[in-house]
Amino acid sequence: MSEDATDELLEIARLSRAMSLQYFKNMDKALSADTNRFMEECLKLKGEKDSQGPLTPQEYAKLGFWYRGLARALLIYVEGLLLVMRQLVIYAEERGEVNLSAGENALVREVSYSLNGPSGKVEERKKYNSFSEKFILSCRFFPQVLGSSFEVDYSVHGWEMMKRLVRHRNDLTHPKQFQSTILEPELANVIRDASTWFFGCMRDLVASADTVLLDQSFKETAKMPEMQRLLAKRDLQRAS
C-alpha cells in the first residue's frame, strides 16, 4: 500500500465510525500478510519434520530461521494493529464519540508535557508506552468506536503467552547471551497460543460491533460533502 493511498484511507477513516471500521479491516489485512507467510512456512516445515524423526542441525537451524521470523512478524502485526486502533480512538474523540480524560488522551497519543525553563512554555514530548500499556489502552477504548462492549479477558493463558512472546522477541533482537540467538523449544508453542488468543480477540471484537449504529453511520457518511470530495479526488487520480 503506497503512502498516498494510506493517507487517503486515513482521511476517509477520520470521517465516521463506519469508515474507521473499514480502515481497521484494510490495515488488518495488510499488516497480517508477512505473519501469514511465515506461519505457512513454519507449519509446512514442522509438518515435514514431524514425520521424519529427529532434526539434523541444518534442519533445526532452518526451522529456527522461520520461527524467529514469525515471532517478529507476528508482533509487528499486533503492534501495528494496536497503533491503528489508538489512532481511530483519537479520531472518534475528535468526533465526540469517545470521551477521554486528559490523562487518557495523553496515554493514547503517547505524549507527555513539561515546562521549558523560565519562559513557561509547555512542550509536548513523545513518551512511548510499554507493550502491555499499548495493548490495554487500545482494547479498552477502541470497542467504543464500534459501539461494542467487548472486553479482553487478561486472566487467560493467551495473554501470558503474548507477554512471553514479547520477551522472546526482545531477546532475539537484543541478545544478552548466546542461547538467545537459537531456536528455543518452547517458542513454537508460545507463538501458537499467543496468536490463537489474539486472533480470537480481534474476531470477537469485530463480531460484537453494533451493526445498527454502523449501518446508520455508513449512510450518513455517504452524504457527507467531505466524502464526496475524497471520492472525486480518488476518481481524478485514477483517471490521470
Image (tube, rainbow, N blue to C red):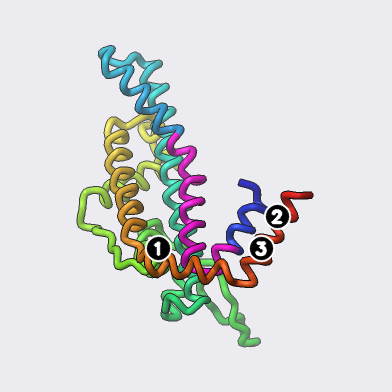
Q: Residues within 10 Å of mark 2 (few under 14, many from 20)?
A: few
Q: Position of residue 17 (x, y in %)?
A: 47, 67
Q: CA distance from mark 2 to mark 3?
A: 9 Å
Tell me which amino acid carries mark 3.
Leu
Task: Give the label on residue 235, or none.
Answer: 2
Q: Residue under circle 3? A: 230
Q: Residues within 10 Å of mark 3 (few under 14, many from 20)?
A: some
Tell me which amino acid carries mark 1.
Ser
Instruction: Give the overall secondary structure of the magenta segment.
Output: helix
Q: Identify the magenta region.
A: 12-36
The tag earlier along the polypeptide, 1 or 3, is 1
Q: Secondary structure at mark 1?
A: helix
Q: Single out the mark in the foreground, 2 or 1.
A: 2
Q: Secondary structure at mark 2?
A: helix
The tag earlier along the polypeptide, 2 or 1, is 1
In the rendered image, the vertical position of residue 160 relative to residue 59, given as above or below: below
Q: Secondary structure at mark 3?
A: helix
Q: Position of residue 102 (x, y in %)?
A: 45, 80
Q: Residue under circle 1? A: 138
